Image (spheres, rainbow, N blue to C red):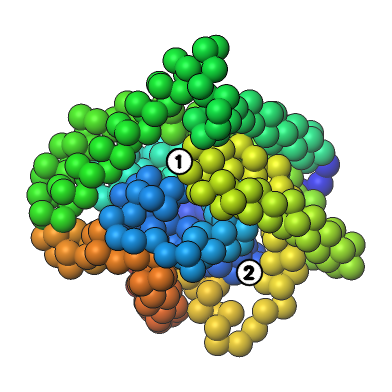
Amino acid sequence: MSAEATITPDMKDTKPAAPIAASGTGRIGSLDFIRGLAVMGILAANIVAFGQPMTAYMYPDAFTVPHSEAEDWMWVAQFVLIDGKMRGLFSLLFGAGMYLFLEKAWARGQGRWLQAQRLFWLGLFGLLHYFFIWRGDILFLYGCAGLAALLFVGLSRRKQLVLGLLGYLGGVLLYGGFVGLLPAVADTELGERAAYAQMAEDLETEKQADLADGALETELISSGDYAGWVSHNFSAHAGDLPFFLFLFWFETLPLMLIGMAAYRYGLFDGGVDPGRQRRWGWGLLVIGTALTVPVALWAKDGGLTYYGTLAAMVGYSMLPRGLVILGLVALLALWGQSAGGWLAERIAAAGRAAFTNYLGTSVVMLLVFHGWAGGLFGELGRSELYLVMLATWVLMLLWSKPWLERYRFGPLEWLWRCLTYRKLFALRR
């Protein structure tokens, strides 16, 4: 584990590329365990956007089937417990994994260039995912943010932590200012005042355009017109990528830096006093959740409007969400160090194959929902979509452990590795 004074991270890549971490060697079990929970939790967050128009993720009225009062409360529960937290965990773990990878690269005389190659391929996987499988991709974001994070790997762990926290707080202010006024203009009498009338009209136009795009997407997917759907992704949504980066940049990059610092402080392998880590974890989790609940109830009391839910998810909940993410990672790191039994083993295996499970889930959802395959897009309500989620969780837990008992890497982990090092590695044990 790195101390405050680390091996020089900007060593030149003078040696040929070689494997950095063989399967079963040099792994931190708690990272795999948390990553497994996170990849399962990401499906819980995304399942609505897999089976319904993308806007339905935040806005229940975008569902193509009725959304009951009970399901409105499910929205509240998902908002409080899941939304943004699993993505945040994944981002934090990604930063920790980046530094772990680099430590082993530096030990072999390699360095950031190898990591940059790895991130380039990740970004390319993300673009393929975005255009050809599902537009909710985060891999392209991680590839871009990871490249930016490489600029900070030479800093001390304290500076990484401080920059990460300050960057996240900057995001809280930026996103809060970006969306803070929107619900008041769109949903209250404020929008009727002359000073805000044009803004209110523009907001309604943008909302209707988004809903119309969702209706078109539903038609393309439900009819089985895969080629038309892909063409639509390129023509209508290629330009969304810069906005997508902006929307998550000041959350993702800071959390990656915090993840690097957390790894270097020993959060994941017993380097922090367990009692202190537990107290901080529970304190942050409880405070963050307590601050999230009023935001969720405010959105529901306001009728779960388009701009109310947008503001709640993007702006108002970011600060408490960050507290929850930090509390969760502290507690799960402790649990992961001692977790045993068949379920914990299978969750950790799902984490070791998280890349395959993340993209594989999207492929499974494509087969379940697209009209040329399962044809269920737009047919299931929130409650039924959660059942699809549970079935997919079972699938993740069933295949990951037996596969890794026979093979050194998950299928896509192996492919990513081969592309990074530009050589073919043995897959079978």
Q: Residue at x 87, y 63 (%)?
A: 279
Q: CA distance from mark 2 to mark 1?
A: 41 Å
What is the quadrant of residue 242 in the picture?
Answer: top left
The disc label shown at residue 340, or none: none
Q: Residue at x 36, y 72 (%)?
A: 384
Question: Which residue occupies the extreme bottom position in the image?
Answer: 341
Q: Amino acid at mark 1?
A: Tyr
Q: Amino acid at mark 2?
A: Gly
| Mark 2 or 1, nearer chain start | 2
How would you rate the neighbour count of disc 2 (Cα within 10 Å): few for under 14, some for 14-19, many for 20 or more? many
Q: Residue at x 69, y 29 (%)?
A: 173
- Give whichever of 123, 6 is nearer the camera: 123
Q: Is residue 25 left or right of residue 224?
A: right
Visible residue check, residue 41: no
Report the residue marked by disc 2. 29
- Relative vertical location of residue 26 with respect to residue 214 in this rendering, above or below: below
| Residue 145, image x, y percentages | 53, 35
Label 1 secondary element: helix
Q: Residue at x 57, y 59 (%)?
A: 76
What is the quadrant of residue 313 in the picture?
Answer: top right
| Residue 168, image x, y percentages | 69, 36
Is the residue under label 1 in contact with that under label 2 (CB below 8 Å)?
no
Q: Is residue 181 left or right of residue 281?
A: left
The disc label shown at residue 306, or none: 1
In the picture, the quarter occupied by the C terminus is bottom left
- Give whichever of 162, 376 is nearer the camera: 376
- Give whichever of 93, 4 is nearer the camera: 93
Label 2 secondary element: helix
- Relative vertical location of residue 368 with respect to residue 46 in this rendering, above or below: below
| Residue 29, image x, y percentages | 63, 69
Visible residue check, residue 239: yes
